[in-house]
Amino acid sequence: MSTGTQFYISTLCVYAGVDILAAWGLNLQFGTAGLLSFCYILFQAAGAYTAAVLSLGPQSGNGGFQHYIVGLNLPFPLPLLAAGVVGAAISIPIGLITLRRLRSDYQAIALLVVSIIATSVATNQAHLFNGAAGLALIPPPLANSLNLSAVNYQWFFAAFTFAVCGVVYVVYRRLTRAPLGRAMRAVRDNEHAAASLGKNVAGLRLLAFAIGGAMAGLSGGLLVEFIGAWAPSAWLYPETFVLLAVIIIGGTGNDLGAIVGVLLVPIAFAEATRYIPAIGRAGLVDALQWIAIGLLFLLFLWFRPQGIFPERKRKYLADGRPASLLISFRRRLGRSAADSELNREPAA
Amino acid sequence: MSLLGPSIGFGLVTASILALAAVGFTIQFGVTNVLNLAYGEVMGAAGFIALLVNKAGVSIWICLVIGAMFGAASSYALNRAILVPYIRRGTRLFGMVIVTVAVGLVIENTILAIGGPTFFSYKLPHQSTFHVGSLIFTGFQVAIIGLAVVCMIVVHGVLRYTKLGIAMRATSAENSLARSCGIRTERIIDIAWLISGTMCGLAGVTLFINTATFTSATANEFLVVIVAAAVLGGVGHAYGAMLGALVLGLTTEISAAYIDPAYKNVTAFVILVIVLLVRPQGILAEIATQRELAT
Amino acid sequence: MSAVTTVEIATKTPVLEVRDLAREFGGVHAVDGATFEVPPGRITGLIGPNGAGKSTVVGLISGMVKPSSGQIMFAGRDIAGLAPYRVARLGITRTFQLSSEFGKLTVLENLLVAAPGQRGESFVGALLGPRGWREQEQALVGEARALLRRFEMSDKEEEYAGNLSGGQKRLVEIMRGLIAKPKLLLLDEPLAGVNPRLGERILGYLEELRDEGLTMLMVEHDLVAVGRVCDPVAVMAQGKVLAQGPLEELRANAEVRNAYLIG
């Protein structure tokens, strides 16, 4: 494989991993807890900015052309961990304000507005994160200690991204498979009934919001440490809708669906733009992509609102243990075998 | 104090455009109960249709009418051809919000794809300026304010004094009850979308007249301010939207003059969030309901 | 001989006492000084013409509506104004007039989620992994399945609750209310819109539960049903409780008869 191809594929792997992580977080907020999280990209941005300003040195460095706060030059993995923490931390005040008394479409608008306000602040208060120009020259983690060639570093980062995804998935899955996940889904389906059964609706929603925010923040941290730069143009409010498309198409509430959604939407679109030459003027292909996303939304919400992989039905075995995917699959096979037994003609 | 005059002037013009837009928006919400997040893009589409006609050499005033007609037709189509089928299919509130967002994305990006990411402007005849006290207006701005006032009076007249208006208010307040009273709610909803669509179109064209240059994204950026005005006055209540438009039009312009022009819309957004938290039913909602009970 | 009778003789402390409860909505006095009590081990009926305020009272007791004034005494404290989930945790669960099942959860999950005190429901509990909550969950599944058998809905265990018929949803709600082992179960028009045969079944279940000692408060329009299972009965009209006692006494009460004719 040529170096160029290796660069390209490893980059795609990192983007896929980051998007999958972000999609799972949104799946928790939207699919499991039923929150129309229209400000989701803000959490990723918060994580990205956090990782950036913690791993960058003081702003006077590099010729002092960037202005930003903090600048502690912290070693790996601290900036990344902090990214996750900050993602959760900012979700809490936002959640406290918006998630309690509003009906879902008002909530959606309020969250969208928060995202827009944040973009405005980041752009105009240039002393925070260098304004519209954004931050650059963010040091890649472990670059100096590992001493890899450029290509091999790319592969290392891709592997690292998948490893992070794996670790986060274990934790995320624990939470959703536990009664906690079920309680969140109950709140999603009927919050008044859930409250009448003793569930703390606001608390559960806030928890889903915060955990999703942490996952988004983590994904942002990874992304910024890979790209090395970050600016408001990377997290305008429509980006949330790309992630929303990912899980609606892939299947809300389904983790495999999120993976498929990532492969179908952002990755496929990135690939497609490679083959479609830059036709017409600048920005045409972008506009066409957004039209495609809009149409995909409409098509899926009409023909298959549950997505390609719908939320898995939770079943239980005779002894009360939850049936895992494998067991329920074998049951289904067993059942169809039994059916064919029954349907066989009785011996004459 | 020299800033106050002009900013009040700007505020009145913005409030006028906002009033046209917000009243249209709130009527749509009132009869359908879904926040139409594609509203801004429909405004933009109307503005761009007007641009096409304008480029062909037609006077801007006729373009305004054409834009209004386009707004009416496309809003009616949006409801009948897209929103109603999805609702009938069982899409919940959740999904409907995304449906409207998706439609908006398609509209805005179609305009972007056709027109390109550049700035546009109408070909406007030279206008004289008018002085009212310390306020300065161009002819267009006076026309816009006049148009808004006329429209508000018409809307008020229709809602209060015609059978159609009463039927619209009934359908807004309690759709199933209205239907069981014999009101043909489907037709009422269609008419409501035609009326609100007209205002949407007018708002779009006047917005583009007022901002010297505009892009495919200009109208949609205005959407949150429109929603803020509608929510401030109580979503679904036309008078509330008028009040909200006045308040927001003035506060955004005045704050832009005194605080920071970059934050002009942010003021509106912050107000929106505060209203949603403190009093999501809006300022006039409670008062309006009581009045309706009394009469 | 059920344990309830002993309790009845020993202490007649009502499980719930509503005192002078009031709630107004923009000038309309939905509840206007309602006072009544719910004795233990019986099904107390709450009847009255439309608009009398019965559903609002249920809303006030369960915490969904905040009172303008008055007290609701339960388990030795005034619970008026508490958030619904706190009221539930104190031991009051309810069913709803309009179906309120968890549509995208299976019937079994609808019951499981209703159980209180699950270790796997807290963030820390879930984080620590299944080892901490698996046993409790298995026991719960057993309990839930027993309930399903009792209410003859075992075959619907894996069905999404949203796909059930109206009557079946009603049963799921009752089972859900029961699994929480409440001290008081509020039933908001449990027979509304239910076919007569299923209605009979439901009444039968309610009588069984009552005989086992469960205290219930039932809002209902069907006076035959009320006459069969409820004792005592409270009558409301225009936001006030007119009288409370056995149904036959109430029938003889002129004020009550007038209220039904007017209201």
Image: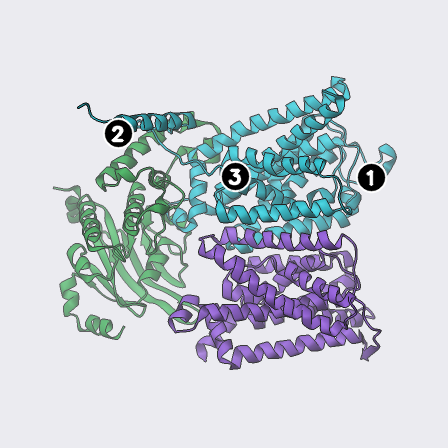
Chain colours: A cyan, B purple, C green
Q: Which three-letter amino acid code belongs to the residue tagged 1?
A: Gln
Marks 1 and 3, the one that precedes in the sequence: 3
Q: Earlier in the sequence, mark 2 or mark 3?
A: 3
The residue located at (27%, 72%) in the rendering is: C263
What residue sits right under mark 1 in the picture? A66
Would you say the residues marked 2 and 3 are in contact, meaning their CB atoms lie under 8 Å apart? no
| Residue at the limit of the structure toward the front, as seen here | A348
Q: Secondary structure at mark 1?
A: loop
Q: Looking at the picture, tell me which residue is in the foreground, B49 or C232.
A: B49
Q: Nearer the viewer, mark 1 or mark 2?
A: 2
- Distance (Cα) linking label 1 and label 3: 36 Å
Q: Which subunit holds the residue at mark 2?
A: A
Q: Amino acid at mark 3?
A: Leu
Whether residue A141 is visible, yes or no, is no
User: Do the CB atoms of the residues marked 1 and 3 lie less than 8 Å apart?
Assistant: no
Residue identified by numbered label 2: A343
